[in-house]
């Protein structure tokens, strides 16, 4: 991977241990949840609902351990590439934060205000977060896209999208 | 011959003006979305799922077939015209394709990719017609233990054989299986991993998982690493090929198809290995080996055909066994479940009309694609210049719309963001996405078959062993899992899997 900085990276990627911890935690969660489930087996179902979560929980903890050993010996995963991905820079957390905020705003507002308004906020906000500085043009595209999807999908194809406060106007 | 009659009937069902219009829409939308940089075939299918929600299953599948081949074709256009690495399956096509485009032969590169895709897709679909019913005949005889064992082969295949690192593949698979457990147990009605949240009782919708991992996860990942300067687009006119190009392309198309289909059809095939094999073969057989690395047309024709034939091949296990072996097939399977259709060996018996209509639409979609794409290539190339803020804002916008529309519930949007963050994390740490989505989709089926097997034996673990088919399947699973240990014992281990993979990749790039 001559063009990838991760391929030649000498420093150990310690953040990977966080992922291992997450896997072990998930395993623990499965085991905890399984212990809560009543041991309900019948002649029809000798295995019961607990077996699979227990097997998965144990497997996750084992995999987390082997994974950690792999990291300790210098193993690292290759971060995914793509047409628009430039791995030479560290992750841009500010952009991600703003995107998540726009996304959450949409989730909160979609039922009370309707898809047309919440979708507009989502598109405009995301485009802003990603560096769009043509605010009027961004807003125009956002409104056009929200209206077009609402009419095409909700009214045309019967897809489930709320009209919200614009009910009766749209 | 019986199959041929069924197929003709399928064509009869599909060839109405309305359905043709739908197929055309699928192809156009699929290509347009697939062409957009950063959107691979899997994300194309995931993002376009919601437009099929309101449709009849047959109509939806016709649309889907168009989107499927359109998305595949769109992806290769992107990799030829954009001077940046794209998704793994079209990486090999991009090596020579991009060099050709830079050398002023973009029109020929696109033409050989388009015609090669058509030929590979058509032969691949014919092979589906021939092979799939045979596999179904075999599959309906399988009991629960055999089926369970075959699912395990698929699990091990997607997580340990494909991809760079076994342990990362297995981690991804286990995360997926855990997500699959969420919800009410189908036998006892016990809630598992729902934490008292009522919306989780029905489980996490596979569509939400697919959109979260592929659209939101990918969108967030790219957003965090967005190129300051978008890749340079190579201008292109109407694709065409001279006599010499034809002469050099057609054997490569056929060989590529021969590599691609079988790899797609086995549970651990994928498109990376056959495209790579096709590239190496063409390089060896070419009368112009000196052109390789500078834009050899065989190096585009072969891998592109292999890529498409492998995509057609994945439909065999998907339709015959209900086992997805690539991400796009996984999402299509999720879509089938969404229409209330149960995939598996009984699909062809229970829904013959639907299956044959889907196969007929694959032929039609593939043909429309060729007719449409040769003249439209310059238009598609313009799509590559879309400003990136709008592109990725659009991905999040459509992802949110699609996920909300599944249940009409904002809860799914929070779930979607959570899954998007998971998608980001696994991309960051180089965990493969495919085992995760396959785990989510197949967990209920695997658990059901496993529990049925043990029920038959009264809880004795020997019940899982079943007959010879299961023994062979377990032998494969064990062989794959202990292979690195054996290699180490023989002292032939060449470092860990990751480095090996990086080696093959740079060989391709060299």
Image (cartoon, coloured by chain):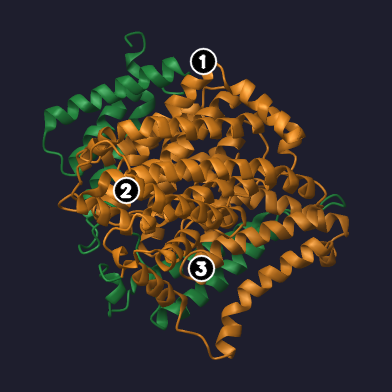
Q: Dots 3 and 1: beta carbons under 8 Å? A: no
Residue wearing tag 1? B17
Query: Considering depth in this image, is A73 or B270 the residue closer to the camera?
Result: B270
Residue A131 figure quarter = top left
Q: x, y (%) of residue B503? A: 38, 75
Q: x, y (%) of residue B211? A: 44, 42
Q: Residue at x 52, y 88 (%)?
A: B492
Query: Considering depth in this image, is B156 or B348 the residue closer to the camera?
Result: B348
Res. B416 visible in picture: no
Residue wearing tag 3? A24
Residue B371, above or below B445:
above
Q: Residues within 10 Å of mark 3 (few under 14, many from 20)?
A: many
Marks 2, 3: nearer the viewer: 2
Q: Dots 2 and 3: beta carbons under 8 Å? A: no
Query: Considering depth in this image, is B493 or B421 the residue closer to the camera?
Result: B493
Q: Residue at x 51, y 16 (%)?
A: B18
Q: Residue at x 44, y 25 (%)?
A: B24
The green-coloured chain is labelled A
Q: CA distance from mark 3 to mark 1?
A: 56 Å
Label 2 secondary element? helix
């Amino acid at each position: 991977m001559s063009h990838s900085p991760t391929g030649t990276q000498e420093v150990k990627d310690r953040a990977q241990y966080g992922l291992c911890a997450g896997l072990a935690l998930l395993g623990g969660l499965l085991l905890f949840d399984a212990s809560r489930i009543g041991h309900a087996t019948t002649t029809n179902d000798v295995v019961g609902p607990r077996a699979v979560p227990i097997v998965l929980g144990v497997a996750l903890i084992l995999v987390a351990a082997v994974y950690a050993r792999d990291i300790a010996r210098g193993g690292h995963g290759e971060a995914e590439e793509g047409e628009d991905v430039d791995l030479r820079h560290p992750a841009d957390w500010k952009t991600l934060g703003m995107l998540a905020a726009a996304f959450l705003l949409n989730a909160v507002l979609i039922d009370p205000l309707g898809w047309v308004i919440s979708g507009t906020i989502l598109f405009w906000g995301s485009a802003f977060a990603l560096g769009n500085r043509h605010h009027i043009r961004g807003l125009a595209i956002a409104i056009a896209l929200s209206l077009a999807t609402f009419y095409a999908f909700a009214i045309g194809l019967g897809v489930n999208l709320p009209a919200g406060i614009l009910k009766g106007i749209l | 011959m019986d199959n041929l009659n069924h197929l003709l009937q399928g064509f009869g069902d599909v060839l109405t003006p309305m359905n043709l219009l739908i197929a055309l829409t699928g192809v156009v939308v699929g290509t347009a979305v697939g062409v957009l940089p950063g959107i691979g075939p899997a994300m194309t299918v995931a993002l376009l799922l919601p437009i099929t929600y309101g449709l009849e299953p047959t109509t939806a599948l016709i649309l889907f077939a168009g989107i499927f081949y359109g998305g595949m074709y769109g992806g290769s256009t992107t990799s030829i015209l954009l001077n940046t690495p794209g998704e793994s399956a079209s990486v090999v096509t991009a090596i020579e394709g991009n060099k050709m485009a830079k050398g002023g032969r973009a029109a020929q590169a696109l033409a050989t990719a388009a015609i090669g895709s058509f030929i590979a897709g058509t032969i691949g679909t014919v092979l589906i017609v021939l092979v799939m019913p045979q596999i179904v005949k075999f599959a309906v005889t399988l009991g629960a233990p055999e089926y369970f064992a075959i699912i395990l082969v698929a699990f091990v295949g997607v997580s340990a054989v494909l991809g760079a690192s076994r342990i990362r593949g297995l981690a991804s698979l286990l995360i997926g299986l855990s997500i699959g457990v969420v919800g009410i147990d189908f036998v006892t009605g016990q809630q598992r991993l729902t934490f008292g949240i009522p919306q989780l009782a029905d489980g996490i919708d596979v569509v939400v998982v697919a959109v979260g991992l592929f659209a939101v996860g990918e969108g967030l990942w790219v957003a965090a690493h967005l190129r300051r300067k978008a890749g340079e687009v190579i201008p292109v006119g109407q694709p065409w090929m001279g006599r010499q190009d034809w002469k050099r392309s057609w054997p490569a198309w056929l060989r590529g198809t021969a590599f691609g289909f079988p790899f797609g059809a086995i549970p651990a095939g994928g498109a990376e290995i056959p495209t790579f094999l096709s590239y190496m073969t063409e390089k060896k057989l070419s009368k112009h080996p000196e052109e390789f690395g500078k834009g050899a047309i065989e190096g585009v024709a072969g891998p592109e055909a292999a890529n498409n034939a492998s995509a057609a091949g994945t439909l065999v296990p998907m339709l015959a066994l209900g086992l997805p072996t690539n991400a796009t097939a996984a999402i299509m399977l999720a879509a089938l479940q969404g229409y209330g259709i149960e995939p598996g060996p009984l699909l062809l018996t229970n829904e013959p009309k639907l299956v044959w209509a889907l196969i007929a639409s694959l032929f039609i979609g593939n043909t429309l694609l060729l007719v449409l794409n040769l003249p439209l290539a310059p238009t598609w190339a313009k799509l590559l210049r879309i400003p990136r803020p709008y592109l990725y804002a659009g991905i999040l916008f459509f992802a949110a719309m699609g996920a909300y529309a599944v249940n009409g519930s904002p809860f799914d949007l929070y779930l979607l963001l959570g899954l998007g963050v998971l998608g980001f994390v696994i991309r960051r740490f180089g965990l493969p996405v495919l085992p995760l989505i396959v785990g989510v989709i197949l967990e209920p089926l695997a658990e059901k078959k496993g529990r049925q097997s043990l029920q038959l034996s009264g809880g004795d673990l020997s019940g899982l062993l079943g007959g010879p088919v299961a023994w062979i399947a377990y032998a494969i699973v064990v062989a794959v899992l202990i292979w690195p240990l054996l290699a180490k014992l023989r002292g032939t281990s060449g470092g860990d899997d990751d480095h090996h993979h990086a080696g093959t990749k740079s060989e391709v790039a060299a």
